[in-house]
Image (cartoon, grey):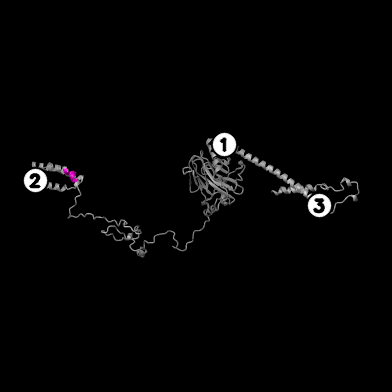
Amino acid sequence: MSLLPLIAVLLSGTAFASTLPPGFIYPSAEDSPKYRDRPSYEIPRPPPHSNSDDDFHEFVIIMLITLGSLLVLALITGIILVLIRRRIRISEDELVREEENQAYLELNSDEQELYFQSKEYLISNPCIVGELTMSQKLIIQEKGITAYEFQKDSMLSNNDLMIINRFELNFFKNFECSTQTNFPIPMKNEVYYFESKIYSLPHPDDTLISFGLSIKPYPWFRLPGRHPQSICYDSDGYRRYNQPFKFTNDPPFPKLAKGDVIGVGYKTRSGTVFFTRNGKKVSESRLGGHIKNFKIANQGQIFPTIGANNLCSIHVNLGQRGFVFIEGNVKSWGYAPIEGTGPAPPAYRKFNSDILLERSEVDDDNNDLSERENDFPPDFWEVHGNDSNVSSPPPIDQDKYSYNAYSDVNSNDERITLNSLIPPHIPPAYDEDEEEPHMGTSQEDIFEQEEEEEQEDATPLDNTDSRHYELETEDRIQVSSDTEEELTPEIETRNEDEENSEEHH
């Protein structure tokens, strides 16, 4: 393209030089007034080989004219470019200024705050550019479509947005928020397409859902389509392309309801974005056709972006299932293959040669413990007690193959188990020939004794009965030292009552 002006100038200079009359540059002697009236033989002739010199001089003049023309043309072109760039810069500044003035006029205070916060967010967080890295390509190749998933910003909690099974988006709070995929559009095929189904929409009049594409990072507190390098299809029927303001005309697209399936397609070569609804393309003729040349500078990456401002549930299909749009199924417009092409699992040599799940070496059906007698040193499983007088129990078969924590160190402590607990004293044996030990008198026995004494006081007693009563009372009131001190006043009173009763008798 840059050689065309040079060739044009050379051709024009040559044509101009050819149109000059002979002798215009170097006039001949015949045209001189000095030799005009003289005969031809008196007119001096040019020296030999003068024609070649004249041609060379003509060529030099033509080149000078051409270079001069080129310099003039380059100067004019530079001036025009400077003026155009300055005009473009002025127009961009004017557009930004007009957009900010429009934001002040049309948006309320909350929307203005979100608008300017988003602008600062985009300035401080430049978009991701470049192709997919080698590790990302390998992950997509090995895992297929399962490598993709929607990820929410760290500022959002599960009470705001919950993502289930990578593609089920559940919005809960009444404020704007959006989510994006972890990987961008691969830009490998000609067309990429995804669909989203409105699975739940409790408040359709108060809920706005946006399905589209945008750069990453994108403001998580804004819906797509509101800021530069983003486009979306809103559930209220409007298409937004870098448009954060309210519309005054009627919606060009049909409004969305619960159960609708919205598709977003992207053509990598031309940058064309198209939308579908319930398996049919949405006509954009009222808006001047599809948006084209939707490309990010410096090979910027484009991500699927979905947002909402109220309670709803969205299920996204990036190609893990069949599309409602038939053309997308026929031409395989998914973001990645359903099945990955990762490496195959290792080959197994033979049966039971490779251990998948390690199990016990002791077979329950054939419990032959004698084969493992030589696996451990002698006396490895024996239990030694601290008391030399008390013999330790013999080794128990059930405990033979349990681990002894005190066998690796020089410890005098005994490993206590249920089978090694030996009582320090033999408990008393109760036989018929032996007398039962007295364990003291309880409070209930004291009450029973008092009742019996009251009944005996009410009836006269003879000497034999009183004597027998005294023996029974003495045998019954054998208590420990602590109990005897507490019952001493009661015993003295009881004896006095008995003496009085005997005297009365």
Label number found at residue 53: 3
Task: Give, as a three-letter code, the residue at label 2.
Answer: Asn
Q: Residues within 10 Å of mark 3 (few under 14, many from 20)?
A: few
Q: Is residue 428 left or right of residue 145?
A: left
Q: Which residue is mark 2?
A: 463
* Residue at figure coordinates x 74%, y 46% from the top left: 68
- Residue 415 screen position, x and y as percent: 32, 57
Residue 464, magenta (yes or no)? no
Q: Nearer the viewer, mark 2 or mark 3?
A: 3
The residue wearing badge 1 is 103
Residue type at tag 3: Asp
- Look at the image and give the residue range highlighted in magenta: 483-488
Going from the N terminus, do you reach mark 1 or mark 3 first?
Answer: 3
What residue lies at 63% left-to-right and 40% top-to-bottom? 89
Classify 341 as above or below 126. below
- The crowding category of the residue bearing disc 2, from other C-alpha atoms within 10 Å (few below 14, some 14 to 19, many at least 20), is few
Q: Can you give x and y, in whole percent of width and height, for residue 244 in the image?
A: 56, 39
**Dot 2 or dot 3, earlier in sequence:** 3
Looking at the rendered image, the disc whose residue lies closer to the viewer, 1 or 3, is: 3
Camera-nearest residue between 241 and 333 = 241
Between residues 463 and 32, which one lies in front from this camera angle? 32
Q: Is residue 108 above or below residue 6?
A: above
Residue 67 lies left or right of residue 474; in this view the side is right
Residue 17 pos. (x, y %): 79, 48
Query: What residue type is disc 1 on?
Result: Ala
Q: For marks 2 and 1, give the CA distance.
A: 122 Å
> Which residue is rendered at x = 82% and y = 52% of the image?
51
Q: Secondary structure at mark 3?
A: helix
User: Of helix, strand and loop, which mostly describes the magenta segment?
Assistant: helix
Closer to us: mark 2 or mark 1? 1
Q: Which SS class for mark 1?
A: helix
